[in-house]
Image (cartoon, rainbow, N blue to C red):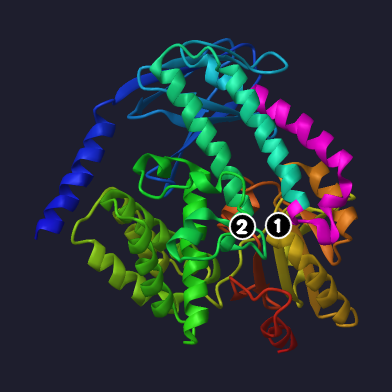
Amino acid sequence: MKRTISFLIAVYLYTASLHAQQKNVVIRISGNTGLSSLIFSRIENYGLKTIQDTLICVPGKQTVYKMTVRHPINVYVSYGVNKQCKLWITPGGGLDIDLAVTEPAFTGRDAMYAAYYQADKTFWLKINKEYHERNPEYDKGKQLYSDNYFKVEDSIITDRLAFLSNTFHLANDEEQRDFLQNETRELMYTSLFYKLAFSGAKLTRFSFYQAAYNIPKESTHLFSEKVVFNEPSLFLFTNYRRFAHLVALDITLDKIKRSGTPWSIERFIDTALQVIDAFAANPVVNRIWKVMLLDNVVEEIKQERKMHFVPKIQSVIAELNKHPDKELLIVKAKIDKIIHDKKFDTGSPAPDFTLKDASGKVYSLADFKGKKIYIDMGASWCGPCNAAIPSWNQLVEENNSNENLVFIAVSLDDKQDDWMKHMKQRNTKGLNLFAGGFSSSFAKDYEITAIPHYLLLDQSGKIIRYGAPSPESAEIRNALAK
């Protein structure tokens, strides 16, 4: 009983501290932009929900966006063709943006933060190019993700931290100092996330893991000693959430493997919850982390239609729902929607599409009537997508003589130039088509929010598997042979 009361008090106090700062802010877009509309987006509820608002632009008039801010938050303004401004909006702050110039110009209380994001992006592109031009061997073959590779990446992130520090070295109020601390942490955890995300990453290179499991100390990653797990505010940062999720995921899978017991969704969830309990003593952090875990599994259910996962997820939600909050209700609504949404069930007609190849030729779903279709959705920047390309190419070659099979590689790159360059470098086989980013009509119609994603359609354009097996698996070969 005491533990329950302590949990509720902790959640109440943390929530109250956020709401206490709640204030209205205004973002104004000016200049003769010639734009028909603008999209304002922000991530809320610890990454569980994305809010997008589309505003129609009226020639000669300002476009005004009003919102309520409980704590400093990133807001993204998308405009034109694949253009976006990243903003940092504070309670009671505000911003005027002129989009009529070559690069957006900012004025207002929150202008310095938007200007920093823009300058940092330019700085990062410059030094990233310079470092990798000087060290081309670290981008390919055995050097990729090696210690030497990460030395280059550490140099880049260290330079960005120095750029941030120099930009705000005269920070003269608490708000600016908070921004400096927040962005420092975001850059640190961005570095740590990518070090844990690559194939072959070692948890033993992280100080917290060495300490928790009494592992003999070996060399650790840069910033490893700064990792903490009991600070609720860190979960407001995208790459911290990703890092924390991978920590729980990797330790869970390692525990299951070492136990010698077969993997099951029940075993996975129960072990993961135990791992989170071991690292998260703070009740707010414990709750957020567990809800994040459930949300990631729900996303996997959605992407791959793993409906046999549903009962276990529902039972855990029911247990946590003894103390309901907005975040848990969001996850519950997502799983309820999946259960009732039959759009991507086996036998359902696949959404039509209109996509172009490199020469500009247009293809639609009807063009492949009478053929089984295997679709690979990826992007040039996606590591797992790139890792699967050799298996994809081999699978295409194995079926070259089968006229009843079509292999389509759909790019979700934002820029067509990135897709064209990547396609040539990787020699991606099959029919290569360009869809655009996650905001494209193709991604929206097929509800693609994560890649790689594979899709298998029958000869009449109906879904066989919405989340089809990957190209290296024996399962996909069996499905294509049927």
Q: Residue 242: give x, y in percent of width and height.
A: 51, 52
Q: Secondary structure at mark 1?
A: helix
Q: Of 3 and 472, which appears nearest the observer?
A: 3
Residue under label 2: 197
The magenta stretch is: 118-147
Q: Residue 64: give x, y in percent of width and height.
A: 46, 18
Q: Of 363 and 14, which appears nearest the observer?
A: 14
Residue under label 1: 383
Q: Residue 139: give x, y in percent of width and height.
A: 82, 51
Q: Of 283 and 23, which appears nearest the observer?
A: 283
Judged from this view, the residue extending furthest toward the left is 1
150 sits to left or right of 51: right
Q: Is residue 135 magenta?
A: yes
Q: Residue 469: give x, y in percent of width and height.
A: 64, 76
Q: Are dots 2 and 1 in contact, CB under 8 Å?
A: yes
401 sits to left or right of 262: right
**Residue 318 against residue 219 in the figure, above or below:** below
* Mark-to-mark CA distance, 2 and 1: 9 Å
Asked whether residue 302 is in view, the answer is no
